[in-house]
Amino acid sequence: MDLLFFMQDAAQPAGGSQGAGGGNFLTMLPMFAMMFLVMYFLVMRPQSKQRKEREAMISALKKNDHVITNTGIYGIVKQVKPEDAYLTLCIDERNDVCIRVSKASIAGLEGDPKVEPKTEATTEKKS
């Protein structure tokens, strides 16, 4: 008896289900568009804004700027050439110790609240 029902279901044309599948896609299309918009405003737009700010900061670096690198090295810019991909960073002025670093490795200017890590002393003062 179960075999008979299975054969009847298989013999019916699938035209009705195709129309419903097309309708489901059209109802899901606005949902996908909304998801894309949310991703754009929450992820892509802020990321491109940060990238532009970082590029502007790196292009505006000049001699005697106090900077921090991505690896945590603090130093003073001693030489920067706009056409080069690197700059000279002095990490010890007394002994005249300078290193050459990539401009891309500069995390930010020293004293910038976006770059500086929060210490316990600053959090205790606010409390």
Image (spheres, grey):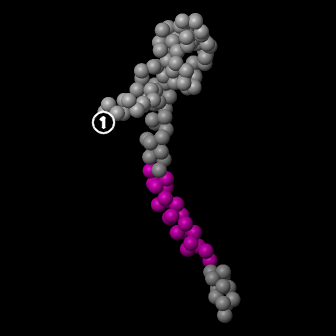
Give above or below for 55 relative to 10.
above
Question: Looking at the image, which residue is at 45% across and 29% down?
Answer: 117
Frontmost residue, 26 versus 43: 43
Q: Which residue is mark 1?
A: 127
The N terminus lies in quadrant: bottom right
Question: Looking at the image, which residue is at 54% across and 68% down?
Answer: 19
For this view, does 83 lie left or right of residue 41? right
Give above or below for 73 relative to 89.
below
Residue 34 x/y as whole percent:
44, 50
For this view, does 79 lie left or right of residue 3? left
Residue 56 x/y as whole percent:
47, 20
Q: Describe the element under mark 1 as helix, strand or loop.
A: loop
Give above or below for 49 relative to 98.
below
- In the rendered image, which quarter is residue 18 located in? bottom right
Is residue 116 rendered magenta in the image? no
Q: How many numbered discs, if any?
A: 1
**Which residue appears farthest toward the left when viewing the image?**
127
Residue 47 x/y as whole percent:
49, 34
Q: Which residues are magenta?
A: 13-34
How crowded pointer 1 is (Cα within 10 Å; few <14, some 14-19, many 20+) is rated as few
Main secondary structure of the magenta stretch: helix
Q: Is residue 55 visible?
A: no
Frontmost residue, 73 versus 17: 73
Q: Is residue 53 visible?
A: yes
Is residue 31 rendered magenta in the image? yes
